Amino acid sequence: MKFKINERDWIERGFTLIELLVALVITGIVIGLTGSGLYALMNANQRSQIETTARLELEQALAFMTDEIKMSQQVMTNIPSPPTRITNFNPAAGSSRIQPILVLNPASNSGLTNPIVYYLADPPNSSVWLGPRVIYRWGPTLLQNGNYSDGNNNDVSLIPRGAAVTYYNEVLVDQISDGVAVQANIACESSYNYAAPSIIDRLGFYACIAPDQKSVKFWMYKQPNQSAKSTSLNALVVTRSN
């Protein structure tokens, strides 16, 4: 016997309450899974962007510092304490916990008489920098030809030696780590001297300097926030100037 379903009767009969509830539940599950998947994807994409930006900032700072070390005559192994004993060194206003890491003696042909200082510090509370630590550079600005400026766009190498040269404090890298444990597995050659801070107090930026003051290995550790993956870079650089 064949049964013939009347299409009109089926349409008019509609869905039962149970069928509607089951459909709603299934729809809710699908929407929930889709939403959580999109949320996870957006978070992963955001973390990836943060990590990429952090690494790019470190790479740019690394390239700049590497070039300046190569231009220098030597890297000081014995950094005066307190830091203000460094010749004419004047750290950024409002900064605290100042720790010079790299003190570069300029090349004789640079025209500079004061050292250039890269130091770790807490930024001022009222600044735009996030911290917890930042890497500052205290030194003259650079001209487009790569030479130092006296602060008035004059090439220092072309003006009388000893003429006034303005030094500025500029933040090179923000969001430098304030932790210690993560750096425990980083070490330099046994013959190298550890610059301030000491090996037990080193934070997100430190350097090891060879006895001849010509080779330096420095390391930076950056962590934008607790959820982002930490980023670190290190380099071994040799001075080339006399």
Image (cartoon, rainbow, N blue to C red):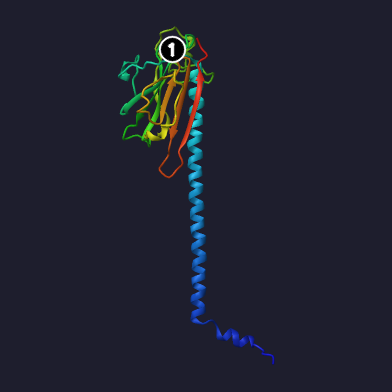
Quadrant assignment, res 89: top left
Please provide percent x and percent y for residue 223.
43, 38
- Asked if 165 appears above or below 57 in the picture, the reply is above
Above or below: residue 3 compared with residue 38 = below
Q: Secondary structure at mark 1?
A: loop
The residue located at (39%, 12%) in the rendering is 164
Q: Position of residue 111 (x, y in %)?
A: 46, 10
- Would you call the spot at circle 1 few (<14 residues within 10 Å), some (14-19), or many (20 or more)? many
Number of marks in the image? 1
Q: Is residue 17 above or below residue 223?
A: below
In the displayed image of the protein, which residue is found farthest to the top? 160
Would residue 171 appear left or right of 52 to someone viewing this image? Answer: left
What's the amino acid at mark 1? Answer: Leu
* Residue sticking out furthest to the front: 190
Q: Position of residue 103 (x, y in %)?
A: 41, 18
The quadrant of the picture occupied by the N terminus is bottom right
Answer whether residue 92 is visible to the viewer in this image: no
Q: Which residue is mark 1?
A: 112
As drawn, the residue found furthest toward the bottom would be 1
